[in-house]
Amino acid sequence: MKREDMLARLVAQAETEGSELITLRAIVEEATDLGAARVLKRMGLADDGAHEDLAELRELLRAWRDAKASAWKAIVDWTVRGVLALLIFAIAVRFGSGDLLR
């Protein structure tokens, strides 16, 4: 039996017999399962290889985040080194060691 048919039968049962709590829960469960299946199908994730595709996308995203963090760390490291080199150079010039650099 298809999910759409099951949902239609549950709604019909709720209309004829009244809406007991178990019937309402079954309607909600079937409706959410049907909605989730539709969303996955629209997103192109309803096939058998979707799990592997999502795992690969997660791995790529993790690698991108790691690369981005490493790039920022390298930029900060080089900036700090440059500032320290300029500071050492300024101190050397201030104390008259600038002649040694020529």
Image: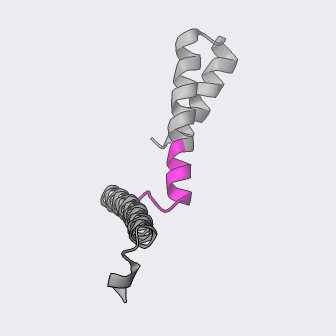
Snapshot quadrant of residue 75: bottom left
Viewer-proximal residue among 70 and 58:
70
At 50% across and 38% down in the image, what residue appears? 33
Q: Is residue 1 above or below residue 88?
A: above
Q: Is residue 85 above or below residue 31?
A: below
- 84 part of magenta stretch: no
Where is residue 51 shown, x and y percent of the image?
33, 55
Q: Is residue 93 above or below residue 44?
A: below
Q: Quadrant of the N terminus?
A: top left
Q: Residue furthest right?
A: 15
Viewer-proximal residue among 67 and 15:
67
Q: Quadrant of the C terminus?
A: bottom left
Q: Which residues are magenta?
A: 36-47
Snapshot quadrant of residue 17: top right
Where is residue 80 shown, x and y percent of the image?
41, 62
Snapshot quadrant of residue 94: bottom left
Q: Is residue 41 above or below residue 35?
A: below
At 52% across and 23% down in the image, what residue appears? 26
At 52% across and 13% down in the image, what residue appears? 22
The answer, for residue 6, to whether it is visible in the render is: no
Where is residue 45 shown, x and y percent of the image?
44, 58
Viewer-proximal residue among 41 and 56:
56
Q: Residue furthest bottom?
A: 102
